[in-house]
Image (tube, helix red, strand yellow):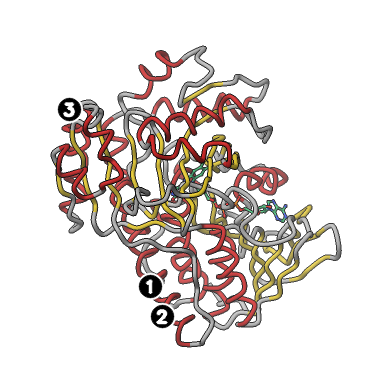
Amino acid sequence: MKVPCSAIVIGAGIVGASTAYELALRGLKVTLIEAREGAGLGTSYANGGQLSACEVAPWAGPEIPALILRWLGRDDAPFRLRPKMDPEQWLWLLKFLLRCRASARAERIPPNLEIALLTRARLAAYERAFAEAGTPLDFQRKEKGILRIFRDVHAMKEAERESAIITRMGLEQKLLTPAECAALEPALGSAMQRGDIAGGLYAASDSSGDAHLFSRGIADGAARLGVKFLSNTSVTRILTDGSKVRGVKTTQDAVAADAVVIAAGTETRALLGPFGIRSYIYPLKGYSVTLPAPEGNAPEVSITDEERKIVISRLGDRIRAAGQAEVGGYDLTLEPARARSVLDALEGVLPQVGPRREEAGFWCGLRPMTPDGSPVIGEVPGISGLFVNSGHGTLGWTLGPGSAAALASLICDPAPQPTLSPFSISRF
Ligand SMILES: Cc1cc2nc3c(=O)[nH]c(=O)nc-3n(C[C@H](O)[C@H](O)[C@H](O)COP(=O)(O)OP(=O)(O)OC[C@H]3O[C@@H](n4cnc5c(N)ncnc54)[C@H](O)[C@@H]3O)c2cc1C
């Protein structure tokens, strides 16, 4: 393939903004087009903040069908299905249920981990380069690890067994007793005393940070490298000449380029639709709550509470919890009861947040989710120059910058690294 001179990236979330930056680093003339007024205002706005290379297993797994049945009809359930008259939803669900096998889950861990490790390397490189240029990339990163806590010993043993794949790939995780969990993260003291913690699995090398600040920062960095950022501009159609891409039509003007990257999150489906190509990316709605960190006893370590199905991250002087998964279409209405259940779960594990409860800000977003828990990264078959970098689902922060670097390498480098065949759009 001839290396393109110019590229358009559609969408300025974590994934698109990083992709624009990586392509500009390789010398391409890049236009980044975003429907909203700035970068990181879609699903990348207020996620759980975890950069969790040690937790890249897909959600689809053998325990999921029983959990879905157990939670059916419960308004505060961590998972909810809202059936729609949309064949895309049913096809997605069917493919998701077919992936609810231990072997299918295990199969996705190594490729996801490779991209997550690339994210780690790229974030470190960005931080270094931005600092050297005198424009630090501050996204309130905390390099204190991620602690998964379990109430159920059986679930903990199962997680430990699954984590063996990660350990074999060189990442250490440590099993902790309840007392060791509280010693590592004193904010968990009262949960430990109540007998709420049967043990923990600690990944010291993982970290957390604010994905919105990152998206904005990397988009600014891309602009400094010459990337043209068109905000408040929607791409309405991808333009082709026979089987070759030639640009996009937008709500403003048409823009020409040799390559187009779709990094439009859950809108990827709409952009691929006219070509008769299915991405199998479907929205999975989630909620987060952000409130001032309690003085004196706020967590530093990022926490995954496996019983309550929430993640918790410290972001500067704030604390954020995120959770909930709803397969129910593209509706972004914030349901107060669902949002409050995330806050209740947070207060359940960290009662010290209680006094600041009234100051909580709620948010919901749509995870662009594939059935198998890996993103789609690569060229669209049959349309030369059209690429997808989307479908990062529950792992967009963990995988986004890595997938951006990998795709930029595919587009520009004579010997691209790493191989992207596990992420092909044709795998479904
Ligand atoms: C509650 C919750 C918690 C989460 N927690 C974590 C976590 O702890 N760790 C983790 O790794 N991941 C987490 N995620 C997942 C992560 O946030 C997403 O995977 C990630 O934000 C997806 O990024 P994106 O760039 O693909 O999509 P987005 O951020 O949605 O960006 C896509 C952009 O494309 C734009 N766009 C769409 N269509 C067009 C068009 N036609 N023209 C122009 N622009 C367009 C949109 O406006 C949007 O800004 C969480 C998600 C949720 C909802």
Whether 3 is drawn above or below 240: the answer is below
Nearer to me, 342 or 195: 195
* Residue at image coords 59%, 52%: 45
Kind of residue at badge 3: Val
Q: Which residue is mark 3?
A: 153
Q: Is mark 2 within 8 Å of ligand 1?
A: no
Which comes before the other along the chain, label 3 or label 2? 2
Q: Residue 128: give its label.
A: 2
* Residue at image coords 65%, 71%: 7
Whether 289 is drawn above or below 423: the answer is above
Left or right for 58, reference 222: left
Q: Residue 103: give its label.
A: none
Mark 3: give few (<14), some (14-19) or many (20+) Cα within 10 Å. few
* Residue at image coords 53%, 40%: 288
The span from disc 1 to disc 3 (Cα, nearest Å) is 36 Å
Quadrant hosting residue 6: bottom right
Nearer to me, 321 or 226: 321
Q: Which residue is mark 1?
A: 124
Q: Residue furthest bottom?
A: 133
Which comes before the other along the chain, label 1 or label 3? 1
Look at the numbered disc 3 and give the secondary structure of its residue.
helix
